[in-house]
Image (cartoon, grey):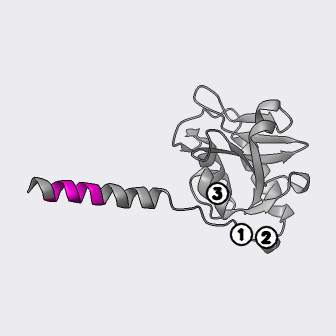
Amino acid sequence: MKMIRRHTWLFTCICMGIVSCAPWPERPDTAAQTYQPSKSAQILDLVRSELGVPYVYGGSSPKGFDCSGLVYYVYRQVGIKVPRTANAQFYASHPVAIADLQPGDLVFFEIAGDAQMHVGIYAGGGSFIHAPETGEVVSYAQLGNPYWQARFIGGGRL
């Protein structure tokens, strides 16, 4: 019986390793998504109304947000379905070059290697709004800040 349990455990570990190492899907084609200024204004109005809300890990309501929860909440309010996590939002969005970012687009940053991304909503003029981290509140940040500049991995449009 012990031998069967060991083999079952080993098989389970191998299977989980294969699943966890599966590659991320490709991002959608850039040309497939067009900029919608009317949604942009709504997105910016909504995200600005959340300035000052505390960061809450796993939060996705005006009581508290994490970075992807803020995007999830704001985009859903304007009728755009979006995945819940920053990584999934990155892979669901259409790539946008930094020079082509428009207000309301998403900006993504690599925080801890491939394992963790951070996301914010581009506000124009090189700034974005995000829920930074525990102890902070929803606030503006600058893409040109050396910290964010070094971690920027791309823009996205949903």
Question: Where 72 falls versus 117 (above or below)?
Answer: below
Q: Amino acid at mark 1?
A: Pro
Question: Which labelled disc corresponds to residue 89?
Answer: 3
Q: Does the magenta run of residues contain 119?
A: no
The quarter of the image holding the N terminus is bottom left
Toward the viewer: 122 or 46? Answer: 122
Give residue 103's position: percent from left, percent from top.
84, 52
Question: Where 38 falls versus 69 (above or below)?
Answer: below
Camera-nearest label, 2 or 1: 1
**91 sits to left or right of 126:** left
Please report the residue visible at 71 percent of the width from the left and 44 percent of the height from the top: 109
Give residue 87's position: percent from left, percent from top.
61, 53
Q: Main secondary structure of the magenta part?
A: helix
Toward the viewer: 45 or 139? Answer: 139
Q: Which of the 4 quarters of the picture holds residue 51?
A: top right
The quarter of the image holding the C terminus is bottom right
Q: Earlier in the sequence, mark 2 or mark 3?
A: 2
Magenta-drawn segment: 4-11
